[in-house]
Image (cartoon, rainbow, N blue to C red):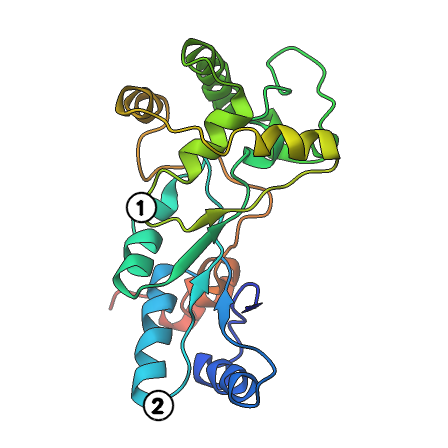
Amino acid sequence: MYQIHRPDPDTDIEETLSALTDLVRSGKIRAFGTSAMPASNLVEAQWIAERRGLERFRTDQPPYSILNRSIEREVLPVAQQYGMGVLVWGPLGQGMLTGRVRRGQDSDVTRAKFMTAFSDERRLDAVERLIPLAEEAGLSMPHLAMAFAISHPGVTSALLGVRTMEQLDDLLAGLDVVLPDDVLDRIDEIVPPGTDIGTLDQAYVPAAIQKTELRRRPLSERSAV
């Protein structure tokens, strides 16, 4: 699986698919996918692949966690419609869902020192509500977070982010955890389906938002007359 990252707004998607198709047909890779691609672009890419007889994106790799659920609105339904695998990253909320990040306490999560998401009061509020929920369910925060990420039928797998064997062993110990409906309902109350709490520092910003010239008409054309 060859995974490309973030679409290049200056490169036509047909050119990208054509180059990746060459890699498949020459035997260099078996399949390819994308990462953080908006739902509209995923649909466009599927249509182009079909019309041009090209290989298609088989997977997408978007961010997904209890704190960031916006892909439930369009990305996951589109992926399900086209039979795409979804390998989500950041299921532990970049470390905020490990139980090591609490309001008013020093955190040993390294990225907390330079990522603004860790100081977002809304995210901290959600974490403080999730911790007692995990305790009531008899689960650790990492096990709650990972089990949530794979509970959606559109998610194929959740990518682990570990630095030590101890962290890996702990997450592997939670492979059999299944969240019952009442726990998922409580999570929905804290973070409504299809919503994000705050913005990830690594969030993909499409060119239509990022580039000023795509959001504003030339000065001479702004009049309503």
**Mark 2 vs 1: CB contact within 8 A:** no
- Estimate how packed mark 1 is, as few (under 14), some (14 to 19) or many (20 or more) residues with alpha carbons within 10 Å: few
**Left or right of 74: which side holds 168?**
right
The answer to which quarter of the image holds residue 172 is top right
Residue, x 50% and y 20% (percent of image)?
A: 127
Identify the amino acid type marked 1: Pro
The local secondary structure at tag 2 comes to: helix
Depth check, mark 2 against mark 1: the one in front is 1
- Estimate how packed mark 2 is, as few (under 14), some (14 to 19) or many (20 or more) residues with alpha carbons within 10 Å: few
User: Could you give the CA–CA distance between mark 2 and mark 1, rounded to whole angstroms?
Assistant: 30 Å
- Relative depth, front residue between 176 and 65: 176
Q: Position of residue 215 (x, y in %)?
A: 42, 62
Report whether residue 222 is seen: no
Q: Looking at the figure, which quarter contains the C terminus?
A: bottom left
Residue, x 33% and y 20% (percent of image)?
A: 183
Identify the amino acid type marked 2: Arg
Residue designated by label 2: 52
Mark positioned earlier in the residue sequence (2 or 1): 2
Q: Which circle marks residue 153 in the picture? A: 1
Report whether residue 47 is seen: yes
The local secondary structure at tag 1 comes to: loop
Q: Is residue 158 above or below residue 54?
A: above
Q: Position of residue 96 (x, y in %)?
A: 58, 27
The answer to which quarter of the image holds residue 109 is top right
The answer to which quarter of the image holds residue 90 is top right
**Left or right of 80: which side holds 96?**
right
Q: Is residue 143 above or below residue 84?
A: above
